[in-house]
Image (cartoon, rainbow, N blue to C red):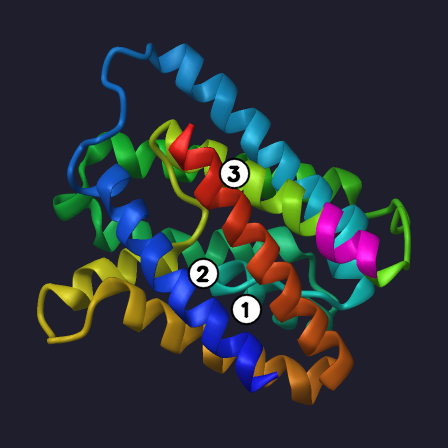
Amino acid sequence: MSYTILIIKQKGLYMYKERVKYYVINKRTNFISIPKRLLFIFCGALLVAIALQLLLMKNNVIDGGIVGVSIILSHMTSIEFGFFLLLLNTPFFLLGYSYLGKRFILLSLFAILILSFCTHLLEPYPSLTQNPLIVIFLGGGLLGLGVGMVIRFGGSLDGTEVLAILFSQRTSFSIGQIVMFLNFFIFGSSILIFGLKEAVFSLATFFVAYKTIDFSLKQ
């Protein structure tokens, strides 16, 4: 498990550097119209909702960041995942308004609203499978593709990245280091709540998702 964490940390640090290009260097394609951005962000958020509700959450597999915290809180309280996702993410994006810009914040809030709504609609449906390999690779792939699509068209689904960007401006730690530290704590907590096996599956899914995000941002 420690070897898996090391690999994910190395890959994650690279990925967060790539993400920042889309967030703060304005690498996003400015010529794309707002309606087209909203359409692709909607599709990305829908893919994430399908991955979470129909593959990951019902098998006690979590993601990192606010999504992972929301899954844990939903499991502990029986309150819907979408409620915590919206509640926990919104303050971070509002805090990052002045640094990341109006467009980024509005597109991110739109993505989170869509994800919250879609997970609510899909909540009554059972998991598509309990096969761990399918859950890891299909769930992680759909999750990464959806998140990558949201990032590519100017938004984000994870307020911890916004928090990390703000902290990185005031400390000696990089964005990737801050987020990976937070994720290490989240995955560590999942061992106590879901068990060691589920935590290992979560780490493997996290790795698949980030490889998929990496691929989608390079296209």
Viewer-closest of 87 and 49 = 49
Secondary structure type for disc 3: helix
Amino acid carrying label 3: it is Leu
Give above or below for 204 relative to 116.
below
Q: CA distance from mark 3 to mark 2?
A: 12 Å
Labels 3 & 2 near each other (Cβ < 8 A): no
Mark found first going from the N terminus, 3 or 1: 1
Give the dominant element type of the magenta stretch: helix, strand or loop: helix
Amino acid carrying label 1: it is Val
Residue drawn at point x = 25 percent, y = 47 percent: 20
Q: Residues within 10 Å of mark 1 (few under 14, many from 20)?
A: many
Residues in magenta, as a range: 133-138
| Residue designated by label 1 | 69
Task: Tell me where residue 150 sits by quadrant.
Answer: top left
Give above or below for 167 relative to 120.
below
Q: Which mark is residue 113?
A: 3
